[in-house]
Amino acid sequence: MGKWEDNVRRVVPYTPGEQPKKAHMIKLNTNENPYPPAPEAAEVLKSFDASDLRRYPDPAAQDLICGIADFYHVKSEQVFAGVGSDDVLAMIFLTFFNSGRPVLFPDITYSFYDVWAKMLRIPYETVPLDADFRIQSEDYNRPCGGVIFPNPNAPTGELLPLASIEAVIRQNPDVIVVVDEAYIDFGGESALPLIEKYDNLLVVQTFSKSRALAGSRIGYAFGAPKLIRYLNDVKYSFNSYTMDRVTIEVGAAAIKNRAYFEETIKKIVATREWTKEELRKLGFVFGDSKSNFIFAAHPKIPAEELFEALKEADIYVRHFTEPERIRNYLRITIGTDAEMQELISFLKQYGKDRRLC
Amino acid sequence: MGKWEDNVRRVVPYTPGEQPKKAHMIKLNTNENPYPPAPEAAEVLKSFDASDLRRYPDPAAQDLICGIADFYHVKSEQVFAGVGSDDVLAMIFLTFFNSGRPVLFPDITYSFYDVWAKMLRIPYETVPLDADFRIQSEDYNRPCGGVIFPNPNAPTGELLPLASIEAVIRQNPDVIVVVDEAYIDFGGESALPLIEKYDNLLVVQTFSKSRALAGSRIGYAFGAPKLIRYLNDVKYSFNSYTMDRVTIEVGAAAIKNRAYFEETIKKIVATREWTKEELRKLGFVFGDSKSNFIFAAHPKIPAEELFEALKEADIYVRHFTEPERIRNYLRITIGTDAEMQELISFLKQYGKDRRLC
């Protein structure tokens, strides 16, 4: 071992959900969209002139940025884009969380937040959710270095009303508040309008869930033009050309199709509500998820047992062993109607066999 | 202004070369390849099933990693991939340059190194090139936090022989030495074989120049498996899914075509050598570039004047105003034969008009 190992940044990385490569499986473990992206994505791929790939992409990704700005009726100066919302969030941590005070986020939340904080040596404190897995805005009313939470929260699916979000922003005028809206399109109210009112707010969204483009890696943030400029300065100090040519055009084309987007969401929400009913009949308990997943526990069947049984049947869901409080829950992504029917049939049979439900 | 501005990471970002969007121009300013990528890239785009984009990509980008490993006859555990070599280099700075001692790099070099160091608050010192713009390995024989240099160097095109590189590595067993080989395929000898001998060496390459895929954003590093593991831990703590599905497949397919790769390079090298001859006849001075650009000065025509005159004629080259020593040089990318003939014709006429050459 060389002495160079003393100066390695040692980290415990985030563990993404399994990506099994089986031909026949029901994959409900990474909150992907069960439907294909808007047909415009396929058209871009088919018509893309590969010889253009010899040129660097537009470092400002203007086609994509303008597409996002148009869709959401904001100015392009209020939009930042990156390689998935993880890239956007990492850039936000790097750019804005530089005080000596701890950044605050929920104790049960997206498990990447503490990974970024540790990697970038940012102090942080987790704020416990209440007994119903809900964020209480008054818990974020104290000196801190920034605030970040997903809305709806992950992996619980619980939605925080806009009034509570505004309370968190008002309580923290001296730091940046980040609302991570990866799942907002499935029934939540976005904090986007608040960026006109508060210059310390960033709203982060992604093409990975509601727009069925997880494989393209497109995330974005909305904020006051000054915030976006600071973010871009850091981005251009890290990697000038983060978005490749194909992705920029795929994203720019796909976001134009509002009707397809709305229709896909409508289908997923309908399937989610049907799945909730069926799970309830089987005795599962869960909150009123407004995301594309359900976070459910069964009082009589340990989550780990069920997780393994499902896996055995080639049905993949997500099970978190930490923190302790969520160990008996499974996070089940909403798939197609057929996939969810198969899941429910399996669970019915499983309960019958064990005389549990 | 909110108090939050006190905690913003303020940086002066790297300035990439201009990306003008003119239909008719000769673009010799960003070291792009004048030929299209291997035809396999187009085939991937044509046959790609867009509905696969709803799924996350393989976080390990195995198809691409294995393609690179196969081409270079190394193990996949010795390969790291990222969103262009800028992403790979940023990850290397973050992972390995964490001592209190300064990282060393040449005073005239890729202008992103000091940007990364400043952004990540890494101490650094620049080491002057000699009078002929050459790196002297003995100048890197002193306590430091790491060493990085491009080979061939940018923007000079000067190649450091392998024996000198090995001397730098031997002199610095306690820190990581990074050889940034963005331009190595155009006539240099890669330090790649040395990774078997030294566990403190990283060799970084890119698909952006010799493989004509700047628009796809693919960079990679070779090193001992332990180094690659440390890099991956940090990468997975920053963004698990950096490489999108299309890019992984485009890269994996394109690298298979060794004949096309070698043929393209042969053409560019022949054009470079022809351009050198012509520039010499016109009185330009320059080193023996082994890259896909020539870094040239004219004793009688100020570089800035020529840069503007060329731009006026829609011929884009690169002019660096800093550091002082290179202010009279232009970096001219090697284009097609026709493009270089047009450049030379322009320069001939320009000299004649001003009775300078």
Image (cartoon, coloured by chain):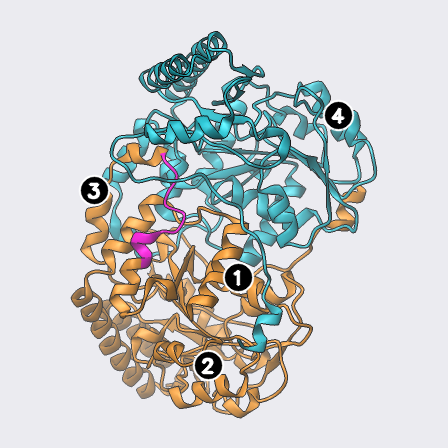
Chain colours: A orange, B cyan
> Is residue A63 found inside the magenta-colored segment of the image?
yes
Give the label on residue A301, or none: 2
Q: Residues within 10 Å of mark 4 (few under 14, many from 20)?
A: some
Do tags 4 and 3 sit on the same chain?
no
Name the image quarter holding the C terminus of chain A. bottom left
List the residue tagged with mark 3.
Answer: A46
Q: Chain of mark 3?
A: A
Q: For the stretch drawn in magenta, what is the main secondary structure?
A: loop
**Residue at horizontal 52%, vertical 39%?**
B85
Q: Secondary structure at mark 3?
A: helix
Residue numbers of the magenta segment:
A55-65
The residues tagged by marks 1 and 4 sit, at their Cα atoms, a distance apart of 37 Å
The residues tagged by marks 1 and 3 sit, at their Cα atoms, a distance apart of 32 Å
Residue A274: quarter of image: bottom left
Q: Secondary structure at mark 1?
A: helix
Q: Name the foreground residue: B28 vs A332.
A: B28
Image marks 4 and 2: residues in contact by CB distance under 8 Å: no
Can see residue B230?
no
The residues tagged by marks 2 and 1 sit, at their Cα atoms, a distance apart of 37 Å
- Horizontal side of B343 relative to B145 (left or right) equals left
Q: Name the foreground residue: A92 vs A15.
A: A92
Residue A74: quarter of image: bottom left
Which amino acid, mark 2? Ile
List the residue tagged with mark 1.
Answer: A90
List the residue tagged with mark 4.
Answer: B137
Labels 4, 2: front one: 4
**Residue at horizontal 50%, vertical 21%?**
B301
- Horizontal side of A143 relative to B45 (left or right) equals right
Do tags 4 and 2 sit on the same chain?
no
Which amino acid, mark 4? Ser
Q: Position of residue A32 (x, y in %)?
A: 35, 63
Can see residue B110?
yes
